[in-house]
Image: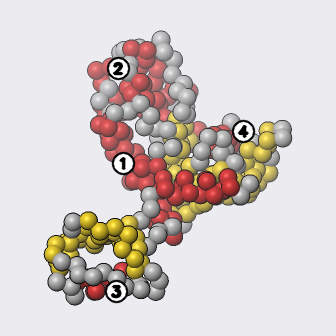
């Protein structure tokens, strides 16, 4: 597996505060990686270390297999939660200025700016000042500035903040297209439903320490409560069995918790043998939001 980013036991202190403690993580090339945690977890510190704004006290940061350096930072696109646009500058003027700071030639930058403004439906606003744009439009301009120089790694801190559903979907589509082209994306966000939808892997921090890391699908499976939702038509008869517990029964809906070693196929076989029609059968997996709350609460309780 080719890695874009790797942290090896990275720690960082600010006086008596240990912002990060022995954090290790791997981000594969072309991955969509979620960096999660409550306020004060250490996410911003980690991002500043990766982008070279800060240096680690101990441990190692590798970009594309090489120790991170200031020269490599030009291959990173970072969109901070606090926007860094000049309010009095025009949109196109601003983007050209930022592109030149990244070392782009003016002619190439202008072509890319025109293309990205069209993609994000901002062409009619190219000559407007930033302060004349809505928050959502400013957010899209900030995104263009982040990806304009074609970085191999982009880090997006709350990228959908201020966007309406249509604009959020538009931005999600462009991010996915960048991934298909090989760009690696790290999301730092509190919006768990978007992480669950967009990210293949996550790392959960709390108080500077890794609480959980791995593939989203595996994490959800590992935290499942063995719940099954069954929609049916007809008469279920008496549903008592040592292999499961009926938690809820409504008209044409059952919520069941399985007891090991009784499995889903065993339950489905039993239901099909009844004088009823099984319309749908669905295993209920916990959402990332549920897992996040559970683990952060447990972590706080152990301190």
Q: Name the residue under label 4.
A: 54
Q: Is residue 275 visible?
A: yes
Choose the circle earlier in sequence order: 4 or 2.
4
Task: Please state if 17 lies on the left or on the right of 154 as rendered.
Answer: right
Q: Name the residue under label 2.
A: 126
The structure residue drawn at horizontal position 27% and vertical position 82%, both measured from the top left corner, is 238
The quadrant of the image that shows the C terminus is bottom right
Q: Is mark 3 on a helix, strand or loop?
A: helix
Q: Name the residue under label 1.
A: 177
User: Can you tell which of label 3 and label 4 is closer to the viewer?
Assistant: 3
Task: Please state if 43 lies on the left or on the right of 257 as rendered.
Answer: right
Residue 18 occupies quadrant: top right
How far apart are labels 1 and 4 at the CA level? 30 Å
Using a 10 Å C-alpha cutoff, classify the residue at mark 1 as few (fewer than 14 neighbours), some (14 to 19) or many (20 or more). Answer: few
Q: Is mark 4 on a helix, strand or loop?
A: loop
Give the camera-side residue of 89 and 294: 294
Q: Name the residue under label 3.
A: 266
Which residue reaches farthest right?
16
Choose the circle earlier in sequence order: 1 or 4.
4
Choose the circle earlier in sequence order: 1 or 2.
2
Q: What element carries label 1?
A: helix
Give the camera-side residue of 14 and 236: 236
């Amino acid at each position: 597996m080719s890695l874009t980013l790797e942290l090896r036991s990275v720690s960082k202190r600010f006086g008596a505060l240990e912002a990060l403690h022995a954090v290790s993580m791997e981000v594969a090339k072309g991955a969509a990686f979620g960096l999660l945690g409550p306020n004060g977890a250490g996410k911003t510190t980690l991002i500043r270390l990766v982008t070279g704004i800060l240096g680690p006290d101990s441990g190692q940061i590798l970009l594309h297999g090489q120790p991170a350096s200031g020269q490599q930072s030009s291959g990173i696109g970072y969109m901070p939660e606090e926007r860094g646009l000049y309010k009095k500058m025009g949109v196109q003027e601003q983007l050209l200025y930022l592109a030149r700071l990244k070392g782009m030639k003016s002619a190439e930058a202008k072509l890319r700016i025109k293309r990205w403004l069209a993609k994000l439906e901002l062409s009619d606003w190219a000559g407007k000042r930033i302060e004349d744009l809505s928050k959502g439009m400013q957010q899209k301009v900030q995104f263009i500035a982040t990806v304009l120089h074609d970085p191999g790694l982009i880090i997006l801190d709350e990228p959908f903040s201020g966007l309406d559903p249509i604009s959020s979907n538009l931005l999600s589509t462009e991010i996915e297209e960048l991934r298909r082209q090989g760009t690696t994306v790290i999301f730092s966000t509190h919006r768990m439903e978007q992480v669950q939808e967009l990210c293949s892997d996550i790392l959960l921090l709390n108080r500077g320490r890794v609480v959980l890391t791995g593939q989203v699908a595996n994490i959800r499976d590992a935290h499942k409560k063995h719940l099954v939702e069954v929609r049916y038509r007809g008469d279920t008869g008496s549903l008592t069995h040592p292999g499961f517990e009926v938690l809820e029964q409504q008209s044409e809906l059952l919520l069941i918790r399985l007891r090991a070693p009784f499995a889903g196929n065993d339950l489905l076989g039993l239901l099909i043998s009844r004088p009823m029609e099984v319309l749908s059968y669905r295993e209920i997996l916990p959402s990332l939001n549920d897992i996040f709350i559970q683990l952060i609460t447990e972590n706080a309780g152990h301190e």
